[in-house]
Image: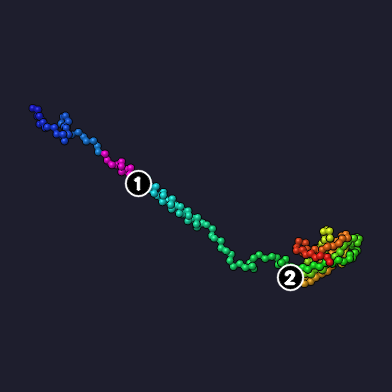
Amino acid sequence: MNQQHPHHPHDPNQPAWPPGGYGPPPQPPKKTNVGKVIGLGCAGVIGLVVLIGVIGVATGGDSDKDDKTTSSAPATVPDAGRTADDLPKQDDAKATSSVTLKARKTSFSKSILASDSNYTSVLVTLTNNGHEPLDVNPLFFTITDTNGTKHTHELAADEQQIDTVKLAPGENISGTVTGKATFTPKYVTFTNGFLGDSYRADVS
């Protein structure tokens, strides 16, 4: 005997029963917020990385400044307290050497080594006013004539030739300086050791 389900009037607020009486239809799956959580998590990680990078750049700039400051060369300290005695000094012999040279006309006194009498002599007097010994050599003298021509000394031509000596401080020596040919002497030049200081005296 077939049982009949009682008939209920249709309620619009209740789901309709499907044919066959198997209960209400399955509900569609509800959406979860997992995607949103994952998205927010990734955004947070990226933001953290960016923040760390900014902080690193800021601190790195400061460290560079510190490195430049500490690696700079120290300031030069003025050399205070130096006196004139600490400065380089000139050669003592050169600085204190002082020579007095005098020259005057004289006649030529022919020696046995002179080939003829075609020479001109000047009588010179050399005084060492310095504090060091002074070397004297006839070859240290030259004679310049009134035409500007320089004449070197002719060795052993004049019997009164100035000697080769070493003058102590305060000493002096006299003798002749002789040039080849006949000319009018204007001045005599003495050079201390060829390359040293030169002293000149007009011929009176």
Residue at x 17%, y 34% (from the top left corner): 15
Relative to residue 182, is residue 2 drawn left or right? left
Position of residue 77 measured from the top left corner of the image (x, y, whole percent): 56, 63
Residue 30's quadrant in the figure? Answer: top left
Provide the residue designation for mark 2.
131
Amino acid of disc 2: His
Is residue 80 or residue 67 the one in the foreground?
80
Part of the protein shown in magenta? 31-40
The earlier-in-sequence mark between 2 and 1 is: 1
Residue 166's quadrant in the figure? Answer: bottom right
The disc placed on residue 55 is none
Q: Is residue 38 magenta?
A: yes
Residue at x 70%, y 65% (from the top left corner): 91
Q: Residue furthest left?
A: 1
Provide the residue designation for mark 1.
44
Crowding at mark 1 (Cα within 10 Å: few <14, some 14-19, many 20+): few
Q: In this rendering, is residue 193 above or below 32?
A: below
Q: Secondary structure at mark 2?
A: loop
Residue 140's quadrant in the figure? Answer: bottom right
Relative to residue 93, is residue 80 drawn left or right? left
